[in-house]
Amino acid sequence: MDVEQMGSDLGQVLLTKEQIDERLAEMAKQIDEDYAGKNLLLVGVLKGAIYVMADLSRLLSQSVPMDWMAVSSYGSGTKSSGVVRILKDLDSDLTGRHVLIVEDIIDSGLTLSWLVGNLSSRGAASVEIATLLRKPEAAKVEVDVRYVGFDIPNEFVIGYGLDYAEKYRNLPFVGTLAPHVYGG
Ligand code: PRP
């Protein structure tokens, strides 16, 4: 799926596949340097992170194990309540591992804040975050993010793993939706 198939549902393209690839290559180079000789484990957060994980991990210069978690925010009925439930836990023991959480987006920061605390409590040697996107204006809690692809405006974005009602994840770019799709 690409721009043509989006038709009038597309607002605008924010980041092209080329821009994403270029930035991920820079991030991978930095990760290679920072984790040289370390027992690194990549932890992807389903489902949005699948494309970031696929592309970022293939840009690393060494074989790196990966594992996956699925989490769901719940509590007050809104996604960003800060209360997080584990839907699928890791298969790996984190004792002594250098964990790098791979994410598509940090919005309020509540999910990642909780996740860093949770993984740190399992005996990991370190827990850091790599995210393709971050929305600084949406932050509700401060999260220390070591690798950020792009800071973006506080707009609803789709593509490259990000969905609207489970649609549009498989777009190769990151874009906004036209208002009529929301009923706007
Ligand atoms: C997104 C994203 C993060 C979280 C960030 O996942 O992948 O996990 O939201 O939001 P926050 O900073 O406000 O906590 P989402 O819950 O949309 O699930 P998905 O990856 O399955 O689409």
Image (cartoon, rainbow, N blue to C red):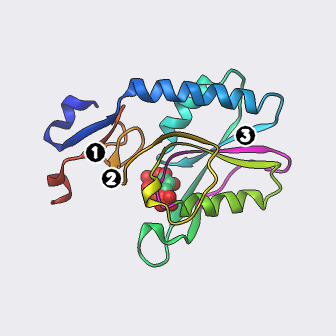
Question: Alpha-carbon neighbours of circle 3 within 10 Å: few (<14), some, or many (≥20)?
Answer: some
Instruction: Give the labeled residue for mark 1.
Output: 176
The residue lying at 79 percent from left, 28 percent from top is 36
Tags 1 and 3 in contact by the CB under 8 Å rule?
A: no
Tags 2 and 1 in contact by the CB under 8 Å rule?
A: yes
User: In the rendered structure, which disc, 1 or 3, sits on the residue that comes first in sequence?
Assistant: 3
Seen as rendered, the residue at the extreme front is: 137
Seen as rendered, the residue at the extreme top is: 61
Seen as rendered, the residue at the extreme right is: 96
Left or right: where does residue 67 sit relative to residue 3?
A: right
Which amino acid type is marked by label 2?
Phe
Residue 77 position, x and y percent, is 41, 75
Tags 2 and 3 in contact by the CB under 8 Å rule?
A: no
Which amino acid type is marked by label 1?
Thr
Instruction: Give the labeled residue for mark 2.
Output: 156
SS at circle 3: strand
Residue 87 position, x and y percent, is 57, 61
Stretch in magenta: 87-108
Instruction: Give the labeled residue for mark 3.
Output: 41
Residue 67 position, x and y percent, is 66, 43
Which quadrant holds the C terminus? Answer: bottom left
SS at circle 1: strand
Question: Alpha-carbon neighbours of circle 2 within 10 Å: few (<14), some, or many (≥20)?
Answer: few
Residue 27 position, x and y percent, is 59, 31
